[in-house]
Image (spheres, helix red, strand yellow):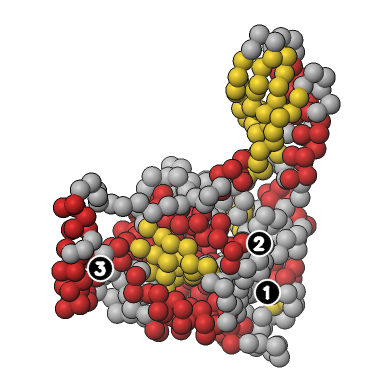
Amino acid sequence: MASVPSVSYSITVRLEVPAGGKAVSQITHVVENAGGIVTALDVNTAGHETLRIDVTIATRDTEHAESISAALETIDDIKIHKVSDRTFLMHLGGKIEMQSKVPLRNRDELSMAYTPGVARVSLAIARNPEDVRRLTIKRNSVAVVTDGSAVLGLGNIGPEAALPVMEGKAALFKRFAGIDAWPICLDTQDTDEIVRTVQILAPAFGGINLEDISAPRCFEVEARLRELLDIPVFHDDQHGTAICVLAALTNALRVVGKDIGTVRIAMSGAGAAGSAILKLLLHAGAKNVVVCDYYGAVHLGRDDLDDSLRWIAEHTNADGYSGDLKGAVAGADVFVGVSAPGILTGADIATMNDDAIVFALANPEPEVSPDEAREHAAVVATGRSDYPNQINNVLAFPGVFRGLLDAQANGVTQDMLLAAAQALAEVVTPGELGPNYIVPSVFHPEVAGRVAGAVREAAGGRPRTEA
């Protein structure tokens, strides 16, 4: 699927051009002919004979940016001084920082914030450990933990390469929920070491957000940490995705007038995200689901089932369908993909029931072309920002953790996840709901607050059980 110019691949080119003449119009013409989009043009310095201008251009990818720069060099009397990748400029020196919440202007303030005054606070916590949430950052802090083994769609790129992503996650926590989050990138992919490291770091945090840890290791890491810790452990790749998918599906079903308890659902992907989505869909009332992985439908007759796949087989596919994904999609009302690009075609979507719903969430290239899917499905959603109905985890995790921290919850339950999904779905009003608007914008001012309130209410007075 051909990509389109995007701000994530935008460049700023500093050019020296003649002060008079048609240089500016030539620049715009060359960029557009090369398939780029000029998004800004600023004069950096001006003189009688020359101008130094900064031209910002949206491109498709790195190679496209280089070809546009080369095309600009062919214009007579124009000199390129510098080409800057705007995304790399944003990341210089990192994207987050620590700031003090209290002033340190004089000796009195120093003596209260640090020694000797701080000793009295430490002794108070030693006498009553519960005061740690009241008197320290623990009440509003989350550790964003990764081993770098499954970063975005980039694979096993390691902890250092994962750090920019975890920084970004921390920035989103702060922007959307006012939570102080800290990237913890571990130089190990040993399950025991990950679990032990997070366990001994946990006293400083009010919650643990597991991120970009590959399956099946992520399942064991999460399960063991939930047993060991008295703070919420939330694997965003699983549960954040599940919340967003259920919220979007709830509204998509409203659009087409169908019910989750009666629709037939075909799923592609039985890994971390797929398993969590499935469990939450079942918790929400779904009854007829077939899950497919690389080898076809998951069913009890297969001889390659690990514990996770066996659970799926035991709770889905009651008819024992043993064919491939294309066969599972035929006659289905809903397709949910969290797997691999380009595994279905528009012709496959045409075999689904009338008013079909397609969630093709592989990123950046979905399981089926959204344009082809739209020819046959009533509602289409992707994980991409350049199509309507983007399923983006930032809709969920800031509000979820805001609610968990405010409730001083010690765990995460399926009821909390269900409440979060319902609240997220309800942000879209009946007057707004339509085939191209089933989830709100990530910048909608009510998203985090509504999700937080629902989680906080669901956490109140509930015994701890596993999600």
In the image, taking residue 457 as reference, residue 154 lies left or right, namely: right
Q: Residue furthest front?
A: 107
Seen at 52% across and 68% down, the residue is 185
In the image, taking residue 110 as reference, residue 85 lies left or right, namely: right
Hey, what amino acid is under mark 2? Gly
**1 and 2 marks in contact (CB < 8 Å):** no
Seen at 40% across and 79% down, the residue is 200
Residue 41 percent coordinates (x, y): 62, 24
Q: Nearer the viewer, residue 219 or 193?
A: 193
Hey, what amino acid is under mark 3? Arg
Residue 448 percent coordinates (x, y): 38, 53
Quarter placement of the C terminus: bottom left
Residue 10 percent coordinates (x, y): 65, 39
* Residue indicated by mark 2: 153
In the image, taking residue 347 as reference, residue 201 lies left or right, namely: left
Residue 16 percent coordinates (x, y): 71, 22
Seen at 42% across and 52% down, the residue is 97
| Label of residue 351 in the image | none
Q: Does residue 59 lie above or below 273 as drawn?
A: above
Q: CA distance from mark 3 to mark 1?
A: 44 Å
* Residue indicated by mark 3: 133
Hey, what amino acid is under mark 1? Cys
Q: Does residue 404 lie above or below 190 as drawn?
A: above
* Residue indicated by mark 1: 292
Q: Of discs 1 and 2, which sits in the foreground?
A: 2
Mark 1 or mark 2: whose residue is earlier in sequence: 2
